[in-house]
Amino acid sequence: MEGVLVDYQTAHNLLITQGLDADQATDTLLARLREGVPPVPGQVTSILLALKVVFEALKDSTQLDRDLAAALHLLTVNSRQQFEAGHQAGLEWPPLLNEDLERIAIAVQSIFLGEWIDY
């Protein structure tokens, strides 16, 4: 997905997979963090791109799909929890991962608010 214009459905599916289906797939951001493994190169960039596409598609909407909202919430909260748990366990995460997780949280907040917050 990196560097490619993505349609809403592709972005939506990626976010659902990364958030809701994280327990069934081993290559999702949440699964990798839970295992103490950093994201695949480009994975966070793809997630951020998908979040921007979803924001643009839904910024004027007054409702969000329940599965999408749940995936966004889990992606934000669980990624931070896994990061912190790894940090406390002495894992050395990539230097920018903390900031990347913050960017994900800000993009999700933007979707919920309907107004893009620059990060």
Image: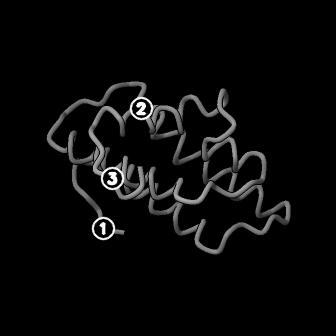
Q: Position of residue 17 (x, y in %)?
A: 52, 33
Quick one: which residue is furthest to the bottom in this view? Answer: 95
Whole-Å distance between the Cαs marked 1 and 3?
Answer: 21 Å
Quick one: which residue is furthest to the left in this view? Answer: 60
Q: Nearer the viewer, mark 2 or mark 3?
A: 3
Using the image, tell me which numbered label, if any, was put on residue 66: none
Q: Amino acid at mark 2?
A: Asn
Q: Quadrant of residue 96?
A: bottom right
Residue that mark 2 sits on: 13
Cβ atoms at labels 2 and 3 below 8 Å apart? no
Whole-Å distance between the Cαs marked 2 and 1?
Answer: 24 Å
Q: Is residue 62 above or below residue 53?
A: above
Q: Position of residue 9 (x, y in %)?
A: 31, 32
Tag 2 secondary structure: helix
Query: In the displayed structure, does residue 28 sit left or right of residue 15?
Result: right
Residue that mark 1 sits on: 118
Badge 2 crowding class, 10 Å Cα cut-off, few under 14, some 14 to 19, many 20 or more, is: few
Q: Residue at x 65, y 32 (%)?
A: 25
Q: Amino acid at mark 3?
A: Val
**Along the viewing direction, whichever of 14 and 61 lies nearer the viewer:** 14
Q: Position of residue 108 (x, y in %)?
A: 39, 49
Q: Which of the two labelled residues, at mark 2 and mark 3, occupies the earlier sequence position? A: 3
Cβ atoms at labels 1 and 3 below 8 Å apart? no
Cβ atoms at labels 2 and 1 below 8 Å apart? no
Using the image, tell me which numbered label, if any, was put on residue 4: 3
